[in-house]
């Protein structure tokens, strides 16, 4: 059985689905601070199987200990965390506590229970403003400009120290580039709270009429068309990389770092053009000054994951945008207004706190 922390969230819900489809038993621990139970009901509907759900906090050591005593967990995918960059600047301690202390509590409980396989959600943000493009895993980590990025780098350091101290650990640090898209069914997808920070969720909300226009943050970057360039990756490709990493951790010990990206960068203007082609109409947008803390460009070299995991992202940009649009247009208010796919299907245990 795989414990998926943060399994009700955007990436975690897609991971649960792929795990169930691959035949794994799944236990989700999520406090639902940024997600909905409906996501898990939809996952069960799509998989045709159930999972176990415990509502609780990853910082809660005694809950984790109880979970590991009650379920035959063999490995953990650790998605639970906070991810809003601006909020992290205003509330740094909450970010360090959840993203760093939460990871420490999880590892303490895992070690106590004799579980040593961990897949950790890191981010390309740990590279900072890299001088080298594309970014390989050998590029030095940089100095993240915000507590969110710092918390990911700190958690990575904690996990390295841990693996150095005890050879039983087998830890995958997965550095995500820019996950977008949704499962092709349109039943699960990204449902941000409040005003979206990221490009695609904002574009989607403009397209469904929830927001007036997209702000393009800067068109004076040293990039071909002046707008920021990123490596967008389909969330289903991303989570398939997690399953490959999990398999690999059966064979290697210590810490392994893998970039999860496509190796191709697109500018904001290219994103707008490709999205307009999907929705068949113009997307209202206006050029604004640069956003503080943004870098000009960032894309991956995904070769290491291809060689070591036998994994490559397969879905192209138009598929990512079409899948994202299917989700958003069928669920304009995300999980809020729509009917649950199936009532009461998800088992919730008495351990829930
Ligand atoms: P998300 O907010 O949709 O999912 C995170 C989940 O964790 C949510 O369901 C939330 O309720 C849960 N959670 C938060 N704090 C918790 C706590 N203390 N205890 C238990 N559950 C808690 O975010 P996501 O986009 O699915 O991201 C998943 C992970 O990947 C995060 O760690 C994030 O930092 C990392 N990541 C995301 C991106 C991205 O662009 N989405 C990029 C790089 C890294
Ligand atoms: C951001 C975070 C990063 C985090 C990642 C995933 C910042 C500075 N960085 O990365 O730490 O790991 O999200 O959560 O917030 N853009 C617009 N208009 C918008 C939104 C974005 O023009 O409304 C542009 C940005 O300037 C950038 C590109 O679109 O060039 C992508 O932005 P975004 O989706 O926020 O991702 P990152 O900035 O790469």
Image (cartoon, helix red, strand yellow):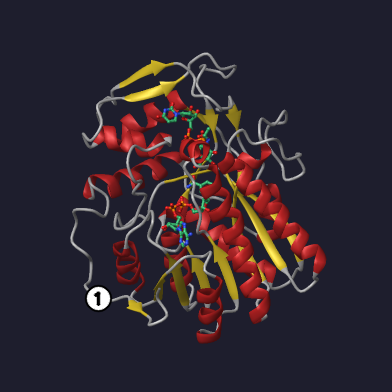
Q: Which residue is mark 1?
A: 344
Image height check: is 124 above or below 311? Answer: above
Image height check: is 310 above or below 259? Answer: below
Specify whether 53 is left or right of 294.
Answer: left
- Choose top left, top right, bottom left or bottom right for residue 341: bottom left
Viewer-proximal residue among 82 and 290: 82
The residue lying at 56 percent from left, 65 percent from top is: 77
Residue 143 location in percent, x, y? 69, 35
Specify whether 98 is left or right of 325.
Answer: right
Q: Is mark 1 within 8 Å of ligand 1?
A: no
Viewer-proximal residue among 158 and 289: 158
Image height check: is 123 above or below 15? Answer: above
The residue lying at 65 percent from left, 53 percent from top is: 155
- Choose top left, top right, bottom left or bottom right for residue 146: top right
Q: How many marks?
A: 1
Q: Label 1: few (<14), some or many (≥20) within 10 Å? A: few
Residue 269 location in percent, x, y? 43, 23
Specify whether 298 is left or right of 286.
Answer: right
Specify whether 258 is left or right of 277.
Answer: right
Q: Quadrant of the C terminus?
A: bottom left
Residue 271 location in percent, x, y? 42, 30
Q: Secondary structure at mark 1?
A: loop
- Choose top left, top right, bottom left or bottom right for residue 75: bottom right
Viewer-proximal residue among 101 and 29: 101
The residue lying at 55 percent from left, 47 percent from top is: 93
The residue lying at 58 percent from left, 24 percent from top is: 296
Residue 91 location in percent, x, y? 49, 42
Residue ranking furthest to the top: 220
């Amino acid at each position: 059985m795989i414990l998926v922390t943060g399994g009700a969230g955007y990436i975690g819900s897609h991971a649960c689905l792929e795990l169930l489809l691959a035949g794994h038993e799944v236990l989700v621990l999520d406090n639902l601070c940024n997600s909905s139970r409906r996501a898990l009901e939809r996952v069960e509907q799509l998989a045709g199987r159930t999972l176990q759900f415990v509502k609780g906090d990853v910082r809660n050591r005694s809950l984790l200990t109880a979970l590991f005593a009650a379920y035959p967990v063999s490995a953990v995918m650790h998605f639970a965390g906070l991810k809003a960059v601006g909020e992290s600047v205003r509330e740094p301690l909450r970010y360090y506590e959840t993203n760093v202390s939460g990871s420490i509590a999880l590892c303490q409980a895992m070690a106590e229970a004799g579980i040593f396989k961990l897949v950790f959600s890191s981010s390309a943000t740990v590279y900072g403003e890299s001088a080298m493009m594309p970014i390989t895993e050998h590029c030095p980590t940089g100095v993240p400009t915000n507590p969110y990025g710092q918390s990911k780098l700190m958690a990575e350091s904690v996990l390295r120290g841990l693996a150095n101290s005890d050879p039983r650990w087998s830890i995958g640090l997965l550095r995500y580039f820019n996950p977008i898209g949704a499962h092709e069914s349109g039943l699960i997808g990204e449902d941000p709270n409040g005003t979206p920070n990221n490009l695609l969720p904002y574009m989607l909300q403009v397209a469904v009429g929830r927001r007036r226009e997209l702000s393009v943050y800067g068109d004076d970057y040293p990039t071909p068309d002046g707008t920021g360039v990123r490596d967008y990756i389909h969330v289903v490709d991303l989570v398939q990389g997690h399953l490959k990493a999990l398999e690999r951790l059966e064979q290697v010990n210590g810490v392994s770092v893998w970039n999860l990206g496509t190796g191709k960068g697109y500018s904001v203007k290219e994103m707008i053009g490709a999205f307009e082609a999907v929705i068949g109409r113009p997307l209202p947008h206006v050029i604004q000054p640069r956003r503080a803390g943004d870098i000009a460009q960032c894309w991956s070299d995904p070769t290491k994951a291809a060689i070591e995991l036998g994994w490559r992202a397969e879905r192209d940009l138009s598929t990512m945008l079409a899948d994202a649009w299917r989700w958003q247009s069928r669920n304009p208010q995300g999980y809020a207004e729509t009917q649950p796919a199936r009532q009461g299907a998800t088992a919730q245990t008495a351990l829930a706190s």
